[in-house]
Image: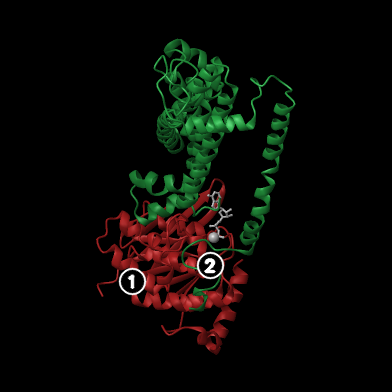
Amino acid sequence: MTEALGRLVAKGVCKSFGSLPVLDGIDLDVSAGRTLALLGPSGCGKSTLLRVMAGFESFDAGTVTVDGEPVTGPSPTRGMVAQAGTLFPWLTVRQNVGFGPRDRGDRQAAETVTELLAATGLSDFADALPRQLSGGMRQRAAIAQVLANRPPLLLLDEPFGALDAQTRLRMHEWVRGLLAERPTTTVLVTHDVDEALLLGDQLGLLSARPAKVVALRDVPFGSDRGRHTLADPAFVSLKAGVLNEVLEAS
Amino acid sequence: MSDTLAGVAAPMGVVVTPATAARRGRRRPRRLLGLIVPLLVLVCWQLAWQWELKPRTIIPSPHEVLTAADAFFFGERVAGLSGVVYFKGAGWSHLATSLGRCGQAWVVAVVVGVVLGLGLGLSRWVADLLDPFTNALRAVPLFAWLPLAAVWFGVNPTSGKILIFIGALWPVLVATTDSVARVPAAQIEAARMLGTPRSRLWRRVYLPSALPEIVTGLRLSLTLAWTCVIIGELGGTTDGVGAMMNAAREAGRTEQIIVGILVFAVIGFAADRLLRLLSRRFVSWSDT
Ligand SMILES: Nc1ncnc2c1ncn2[C@@H]1O[C@H](COP(=O)(O)OP(=O)(O)O)[C@@H](O)[C@H]1O
Ligand SMILES: [Mg+2]
């Protein structure tokens, strides 16, 4: 593995929509290769924060940098999976996953895509259209689409929010495996405490709108997290504590 | 991963839901239902001829029309006194001429409509520049162009092509402009994030995303184009189905006029079906 890239630093990021303040001085520092899970009440500005990091949204004050480079617009080095998914309905799964590599003139596009389709369990559905996929498959394809560019930074906006509990748990285990093989700095936005504790190396709590970071802590679990972790007494008590904090923050 | 197979019938092809299956099953009797009215018309027609409600030169029998149609397409072509034979055996050549005129003007209208529509839908600047102008022109009834075209070019196929072009242009232009303007911002953002250069967005996202609606516009415009082709054939030419019908009128051959009408009906219907089939094939990802 080459030296890990993708250190994300946000300093004092503020953003309002007209007279509605949404982000209120966000400070974050995610080391390369780590996963930050951001928990916050709905409507607090989580999606807005991710869109700022992706370069889709301008902001009023503060700085956002990746490996020292300021974020000024969308870039294939910052892959974002939007809340509603971003597959192009007229392209097959294979064409969707290969979309970025193709447009960037990546010579190894075909290999990358085949490998990612295998890693996402979608090899048999390579020629299917997005509407023919189940919800879980669609989200896996959307993540594969973004990872095909090998971005140092991955931004996930409630990627599994629309899935049923069992599928979501399976997706958590799958994402862990996927990211273990491809060290990628990840910011995961969610309102699901289980998801945050299963996937995050770090946990950030956001306040109600306008969003501030009210707590930032390490998650004391190793890389072998999975469904068995849910029954771990340490996990259960941590979850209860976090849930309490979330409820107080909102 | 056990959800891999959930809810999907096959990796390729359309998922057949009970609803579509039921609809398919019901379509057959419905189609037969569609035959009732034409049959009724045919019976009334035959009776009108038999009882001679009007002179037989004005209402020919269905059988006469059928014989004429057969002669039109399959009769042996012979040179007449003037060297121009407009009917017997001339069917395919008249049809090819009309199709060619219609096709030419339609293709030009489609290209201009799609390109202009992309410009209007993609660029605020182009829209501000052209919108008032195109909207004013669009408000002119199609046949109001006819006198002007007749003065400039005469009543002939050139005027006809211009009318086809104008008539076919608007549905394509409007469909393209509207659908391009409605492309979800999320799709554009996704492409930008994945690395598509701005200059390629129209080809990678705008056009494919808008295609189903554009194809609907194409179908509408083709129907209109086929409607307009006859206008240019009412003068200045001896070729084309319309010219044949005009000559038949002068010769007082009602059955030949009716053959022309039937040709227009069949070809118009078939062209729309063909385009619908093609659109199903190429924009099958949208549910229309
Ligand atoms: N483009 C926008 N224009 C105006 N207000 C917006 C826009 N996007 C989001 N908002 C508002 O900003 C707030 C935060 O939205 P969002 O970031 O989507 O919250 P979350 O993802 O945490 O649920 C909401 O009150 C929302 O209405
Ligand atoms: Mg959100």
A90 or A27: nearer the eye?
Answer: A90
Q: Is residue B248 left or right of residue B61?
A: left
Can you say whether A166 is above or below B41 in the image? below
How far separated are the C-alphas under marks 2 and 1? 21 Å
N-term mark: 2 or 1: 1
Q: How many marks?
A: 2
Chain A, colour shown:
red
Question: Looking at the rendered structure, which numbered label has been put on residue A135?
Answer: 2
Which SS class for mark 1? helix
Specify whether tag 1 is near ligand 2 (CB below 8 Å). Answer: no
A198 or B7: nearer the eye?
Answer: B7
Q: Which chain is green?
A: B
Say if labels 2 and 1 share a chain.
Answer: yes
Question: Looking at the rendered structure, which numbered label has been put on residue A115?
Answer: 1
Q: Is residue A72 left or right of residue A25?
A: left
Determine if residue A230 is in view: yes
Determine if residue A214 is in view: no
